[in-house]
């Protein structure tokens, strides 16, 4: 359970992000332990949170990095990740981003289309390099999650559709500057039904037999990430249940001798340790509801506005035995979508009360904007306060 140092918080300018560094350490240790049971390789999805202190802990634990931009590659290099642990995905890789990866001999490019493969081959040739590539294949597996974060269906922009694979392999035979390493998949995010991952395994098994029939051996099977967390009860489920997650892949993925299984975990590692701390500016009596107006807004945490995501909201200043009232908890931004939750029962809110928006460590700080010319929130850490 994350403990909030309320007296210390009172001295700090809100809003700000607060990270429970012990919880992060415990989560990383659990991921390391459970993945090591099966000799699985884990890359941290840096898009979830690129805070330097967070990245340093992840690097020290020995994880690789999953990047989706050249900026993320450069960040990973700057904080000390080894290039041989960096994989690079993304449907629209710019030339300079590809060149950055080539010049630094990153582990693998996860290729999402034939035109991209052609450009990688061309740029690698100019630099006298051989690019290691895996094909990101769209397996048409439904992830039963929000439609904005489903990525493995035929209608999504990501990956190579299975009907296009044959032509891609034919073209690749003519390319001298790329080296086939394996297959890459990612079916979506915030997936809590493990049957979705079982379905992915069964599809991967079919595909790898198809590759082998074409005399191509997929050394790497990268199954992506997407494992979800409990946003409703972050105290009792502070860490995702990684043991059954990894066991699904052990039980249902047909791993052959000489193959490596890779994962790209983000949210399940960093979401629960992060919290957005805000103050109540006003309590406004509306016609149909009470509004608790915070000094944090969608510029500080966009997930509720963008994905209709629900985060647990706590009045951490109030006595737990206080009478509960119903509030719409909103921010100060000039947008109706600037709301963190509607009809939330909370201990009575008063001006100046501190509020914690929980499970905000993933896609929180990293997606901050300066809309309305607002300042970016600072970050503070449990081992400093």
Image (spheres, rainbow, N blue to C red):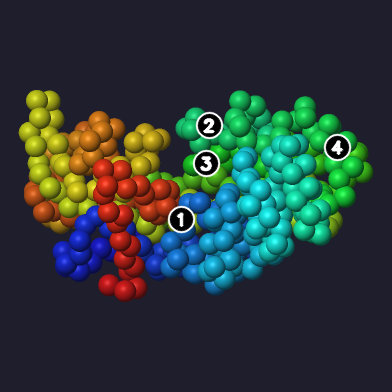
Rendered position, 19 above or below 297: below
Please report whichever mark, 4 or 3, sits nearer to the chain's N-terminal start: 4
Q: Is residue 147 left or right of residue 142?
A: left
Please report whichever mark, 4 or 2, sits nearer to the chain's N-terminal start: 2
Rendered position, 139 above or below 383: above
Instruction: Return the residue nearer the eye: 179 or 184.
Output: 179
Q: Residues within 10 Å of mark 2 (few under 14, many from 20)?
A: some
Find residue 215 and report its image quarter.
Answer: top right
Structural distance between the alpha carbons of marks 4 and 2: 34 Å
Q: Residue at x 40, y 35 (%)?
A: 307
Please report whichever mark, 2 or 1, sits nearer to the chain's N-terminal start: 1
The residue under label 3 is 189
Q: Residues within 10 Å of mark 4 (few under 14, many from 20)?
A: few
Rendered position, 70 above or below 113: below
Q: Quadrant of the C terminus?
A: bottom left
Pointer 4 with pointer 2, Cβ within 8 A: no
Q: Is residue 235 left or right of residue 255?
A: left
Q: Quadrant of the N terminus?
A: bottom left
Structural distance between the alpha carbons of marks 2 and 3: 9 Å
Q: Nearer the viewer, mark 2 or mark 1?
A: 1
The residue under label 4 is 171
Please report whichever mark, 2 or 3, sits nearer to the chain's N-terminal start: 2
Please report whichever mark, 1 or 3, sits nearer to the chain's N-terminal start: 1
- SS at circle 1: loop
Residue 263, horizontal then vertical, whole percent:
63, 53
Instruction: Return the residue nearer the eye: 369 or 125.
Output: 125
Total numbered labels: 4
């Amino acid at each position: 359970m994350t403990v909030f140092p309320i007296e210390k918080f009172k001295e700090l300018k809100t809003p700000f992000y607060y990270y429970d560094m012990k919880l992060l350490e415990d989560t990383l240790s659990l991921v390391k332990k459970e993945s090591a049971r099966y000799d699985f390789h884990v890359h941290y999805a840096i898009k979830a949170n690129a805070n330097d202190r967070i990245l340093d802990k992840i690097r020290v634990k020995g994880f690789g990095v999953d990047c989706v931009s050249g900026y993320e590659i450069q960040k990973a290099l700057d904080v000390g990740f080894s290039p041989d642990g960096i994989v690079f995905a993304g449907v629209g890789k710019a030339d300079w981003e590809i060149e950055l990866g080539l010049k630094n001999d990153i582990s693998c490019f996860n290729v999402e289309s034939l035109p991209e493969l052609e450009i990688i081959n061309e740029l690698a040739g100019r630099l006298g390099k051989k690019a290691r590539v895996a094909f990101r294949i769209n397996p048409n597996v439904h992830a039963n999650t929000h439609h904005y974060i489903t990525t493995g269906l035929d209608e999504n922009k990501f990956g190579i559709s299975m009907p296009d694979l044959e032509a891609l392999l034919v073209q690749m035979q003519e390319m001298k500057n790329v080296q086939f390493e394996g297959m890459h998949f990612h079916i979506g995010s915030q997936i809590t039904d493990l049957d979705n991952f079982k379905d992915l395994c069964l599809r991967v098994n079919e595909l790898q037999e198809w590759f082998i029939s074409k005399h191509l051996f997929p050394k790497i099977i990268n199954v992506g990430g997407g494992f979800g967390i409990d946003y409703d009860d972050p105290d009792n489920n502070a860490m995702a249940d990684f043991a059954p997650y990894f066991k699904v892949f052990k039980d249902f993925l047909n791993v052959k001798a000489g193959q490596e299984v890779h994962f790209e975990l983000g949210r399940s590692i960093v979401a629960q340790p992060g919290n957005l701390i805000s103050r109540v500016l006003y309590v406004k009596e509306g016609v149909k509801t009470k509004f608790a107006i915070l000094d944090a807004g969608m510029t500080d945490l966009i997930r509720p506005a963008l994905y209709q995501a629900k985060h647990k909201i706590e009045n951490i200043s109030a006595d737990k035995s206080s009478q509960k009232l119903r509030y719409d908890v909103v921010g100060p931004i000039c947008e109706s979508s600037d709301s963190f939750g509607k009809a939330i029962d909370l201990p009575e809110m008063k001006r100046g009360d501190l509020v914690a928006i929980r499970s905000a460590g993933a896609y929180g700080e990293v997606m901050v904007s300066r809309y309305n010319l607002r300042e970016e929130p600072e970050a503070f850490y449990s081992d400093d306060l």
